Structure formats: C-alpha cells, structure tokens
Image (cartoon, grey):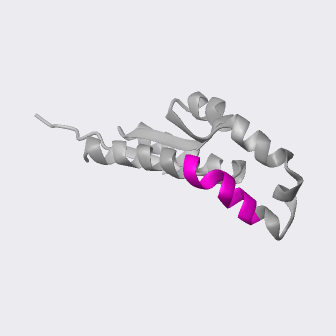
Amino acid sequence: MQTRCVRSKSAVSTGTAGDVYPFVTIGERLRHHGHEVTIATNSTFEPLVAGARLEFQPVWLEDESERAFANPAFWDPVRGPQLAWHLMREPVMRRTYAVIARDLRRGP
C-alpha cells in the first residue's frame, strides 16, 4: 500500500500580474502533483487564482490599492516607494504572516 503525503504550499506576491501569473502557473503544476496550493496576493487577482482552482488569500485589499493608486504621491519616483511601504506595511505584512503561519501549523 502506497501512502501519498499532501504538502501545503503558499506563494505570496504583492506585485503586478507579471509577478502573479508565474505563481499561478507553478501552483497549477503543484496541485496537479497532489499539493495544496494557496496564492496570497492582491484581491484583484482572486478570479485568476480561483480559475486555476487554487486557494486564494488576499494580502492587499482592492480598496487599499485603489486608495494608494489614487494618491498622486504614489506615482512620484521619489515619494512613491516610501508611500507604498507606509500604506502596505502593517496590513499586508500581517496578512502575509497569517498565511505563512497557517501553512507552518499544517506541517509538511
């Protein structure tokens, strides 16, 4: 009798589609091989992740990103990165930590 070990994997990205699509592709392959996969990213990518039949966890909510993108300082080459860090630091880090901690509790 052969036993199959299901492993839980998470991929976290707060970036753009160019960052998220590769994680989804990798996630699909991992799922195909029996792994449970969670993609944790911006809430705007939930339909993409769900369409790939992967678990989705939001780390940056749509209203948070809309507020950031509506702020002209966000697009300033000097002030933008600092503002992005300020806006994302607490909520994104807290949610990201929760996803990773959950996977660690699940074990291998």
Query: Residue 30 appears at what percent x and percent y?
Result: 43, 44
Query: Residue 70 appears at what percent x and percent y?
Result: 85, 45
Q: Residue at x 67, y 58 (%)?
A: 86
Circle count: 0
42 displayed left or right of 100: right
Q: Residue pushed farthest bottom?
A: 78
Residue 31 falls in image quadrant: top left
Asked if 29 appears above or below 80 in the picture, the reply is: above
Query: Image quadrant for the N terminus?
Result: top left
Residue 103 falls in image quadrant: top left
Asked if 101 appears above or below 57 in the picture, the reply is: below
33 displayed left or right of 85: left
Q: Residue at x 42, y 44 (%)?
A: 98
Residue 86 vs residue 95, the one in the foreground:
86
Tell me, yes or no, whether the highlighted magenta stretch contains residue 34: no
Residue 36 vs residue 64, the one in the foreground:
64
Query: Residue 106 appears at what percent x and percent y?
Result: 27, 41
The rendered magenta stretch, by its main secondary structure, is classed as helix
100 displayed left or right of 4: right
Q: Residue at x 40, y 46 (%)?
A: 9
Magenta residues, start to end? 81-91
Asked if 76 appears above or below 39 in the picture, the reply is: below
Residue 25 vs residue 88, the one in the foreground:
88
Q: Residue pushed farthest left?
A: 1
Q: Residue at x 65, y 38 (%)?
A: 61
